[in-house]
Amino acid sequence: MVGGNFVGVVLLVEIIVVMMSGCRFGANGLSMDYYFRSCPIVDPIIKTTVSRALQVDPTLAAGLVRMHFHDCFVEGCDGSVLIDSTKDNTAEKDSPANLSLRGYEVIDAVKEQLERMCPGVVSCADIVAMAARDAVSMAGGPIYEIPKGRMDGRRSRIEDTFNLPGFTLNASGLITIFGKHGFTVEELVALSGAHTLGVASCAAFKSRLTDVDQNMDADFAKTLSKTCSSGDNAKQPFDATMNRFDNLYFNTLQRKAGVLTSDQTLFADSRTAGTVNRFAFSQAMFFASFQGAMIKMGALDVKDSSNGEVRKNCHKIN
Ligand code: HEM
Ligand SMILES: *[C@@H]1O[C@H](CO)[C@@H](O)[C@H](O)[C@H]1NC(C)=O
Ligand SMILES: *[C@@H]1O[C@H](CO)[C@@H](O)[C@H](O)[C@H]1NC(C)=O
């Protein structure tokens, strides 16, 4: 009798444990502890690799964050941004919209180690998402956990990159395109705050100099002209602390020193200006909103085993 009761209790406990772990899976199939059993080393490997890469080149934090954005906005967060073109297919990578995506070698270095430690387990899409998460916190931004379990997609086509927002969009255009992906106006502003990191090429803002933009500070216009005197490829930092994830980007917009039309419009338009002011005033509010929006972005149209795979090599479909 006692033995029977014991088995019963053990079964009951197991059922509760299974139910609870079931609850940790979101509706999209992602979960916080996805690799808990299959590849527990995943977090330390990504953290060390990203940290070493940033020690050598701190500007790579920007590259990694932008890569996750470009992955998620085109065909969902499915590693499609990493696929190389073949003779029959021109991939997303080769779109002009990729304009200087950076950090592919960091993803490759992580993948190479993971394939040795837990072969065939960790998707390239998850590596991109986790590398972006670590890049944000290592650059001084919020520390947050993200759900995992994205599968890698089997499609990467240049024509899909039309889903990426153009840098000449005004607030209306940005609200529409982010709205199509399910983001609120506040989330649009928070995600744009990723431009606290990194640089833009002259090619992306030179039209604002000829076709004089009323939303631009006159001294800042001179700065941009000077940058562009070195050509289309010359880089302009989005704010004065380009390797530091802080809220200075929003103060920069208040001074009318935003680099892209799509940046400055957020302060010029009454629908977004309030949020810009709030984030300029409080870094904590920006961080809270940013991490929520990144988790949401990281769940865009994720693939599961029915329409995805774990790629062996992030550059090609298995
Ligand atoms: C709101 C619409 C957005 C537009 C129009 C836009 C456009 C651009 C453009 C044109 C550049 C410069 C590329 C170059 O000239 O090399 C850039 C850089 C960057 N973008 Fe965005 N972006 C947007 C939103 C985002 C979002 C949501 C993220 C991430 C969450 C992001 C992260 C970055 C980062 C980190 C850089 C710097 C990259 C580097 O230094 O290599 N952007 N973006
Ligand atoms: C981005 O696209 C251009 C063509 O528009 C291509 O020359 C370049 O190699 C691409 N960049 C990467 C990193 O794939
Ligand atoms: C935003 O841009 C669109 C398309 O270029 C234009 O039709 C619209 O009038 C602009 N809206 C504002 C408020 O400037």
Image (cartoon, helix red, strand yellow):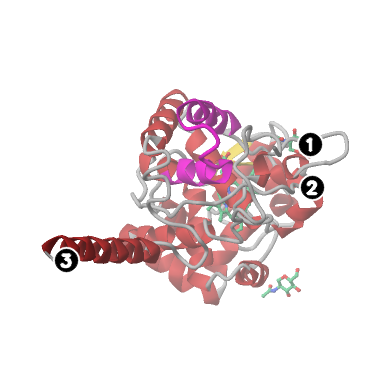
Rendering coords of residue 268 (x, y %)? 56, 68
Vertical side of 133 occupied by 179: above or below: below
Magenta region: 104-133
| Predominant SS along the magenta part | helix
| Residue name at image x 74 percent, y 45 percent | 92
Rendering coords of residue 31 (x, y %)? 43, 56
- Report if residue 112 lies within the magenta region: yes
Q: Earlier in the sequence, mark 3 or mark 2?
A: 3
Mark 3 in CB contact with mark 1 (< 8 angstroms): no
Mark 1 in CB contact with mark 2 (< 8 angstroms): yes
Name the element at disc 2: helix
Instruction: Choose top left, top right, bottom left or bottom right for residue 229.
Output: top right
Q: Nearer the viewer, mark 3 or mark 2?
A: 3
Residue 85, disc: 1
Q: Nearer the viewer, mark 1 or mark 2?
A: 1
Q: Earlier in the sequence, mark 3 or mark 1?
A: 3
Amino acid type, mark 1: Ser
Nearer to me, 53 or 147: 147
Rendering coords of residue 237 (x, y %)? 53, 41
Tell me if mark 3 has few (under 14), some (14-19) or many (20+) residues whose alpha carbon lies within 10 angstroms of its own.
few
Amino acid type, mark 2: Ile
Q: Earlier in the sequence, mark 1 or mark 2?
A: 1
- Report if residue 197 lies within the magenta region: no
Nearer to me, 89 or 15: 15
The residue where tag 3 is placed is 5
| Residue name at image x 82 percent, y 34 percent | 86
Q: Is residue 104 rendered to the left or right of residue 1? A: right
Amino acid type, mark 3: Asn
* Label 3 – label 2 distance at C-alpha: 62 Å
* Label 1 – label 2 distance at C-alpha: 9 Å
The residue where tag 2 is placed is 158
In this view, the residue farthest toward the top is: 56
